[in-house]
């Protein structure tokens, strides 16, 4: 599934590396997370994040499921 919601201010993911378009940081960078939290309700955000994590798992086969969860899901929970 393609990324269906990206953070404003061009903090979008660059695939297949999943870096932030704003620089060398891994996406979602802290600013992307902040913007997404401000512009997306928690339930929708969790669903988007699950999709991103699934896509990233395909693109980043050497990254462990635990690392992917930390990166894409944990921050969506309060």
Image (tube, rainbow, N blue to C red):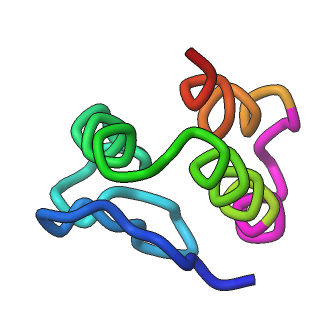
Within the image, what quadrant is residue 10 found in? bottom left
Range covered by the magenta-colored residues: 55-65
Magenta stretch: residue 57 in it?
Answer: yes
Residue 29's x, y, as percent? 33, 40
Q: Who is closer to the viewer here, 70 or 23?
A: 70
Q: In this view, does 61 lie to the left or right of 16?
A: right
| Residue at x 26%, y 50% (from the top left corner) | 24
Residue at 47%, 71% (x, y): give it: 5
| Coordinates of residue 47 in the picture (x, y in percent) | 72, 55
Location of residue 48 with respect to 41 vertically, above or below:
below
* Side of 12 where 21 appears, left or right: left
Say whether residue 68 is left or right of residue 8.
right
Residue at the farthest left position: 9
Q: Please state the horizontal and vertical placement of residue 45, each as a whole percent of the image.
A: 57, 49
Q: Does the magenta stretch include residue 61?
A: yes
Q: Residue at x 56, y 15 (%)?
A: 78
């Amino acid at each position: 599934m393609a990324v269906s919601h990206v953070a404003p201010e061009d903090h979008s993911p660059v695939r297949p590396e999943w870096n932030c378009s704003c620089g060398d940081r891994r996406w979602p960078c802290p600013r992307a997370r902040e913007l997404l939290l401000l512009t997306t309700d928690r339930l929708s955000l969790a669903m988007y994040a699950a999709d991103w994590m699934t896509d990233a798992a395909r693109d980043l086969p050497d990254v462990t499921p635990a690392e992917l969860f930390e990166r894409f899901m944990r921050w969506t929970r309060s």
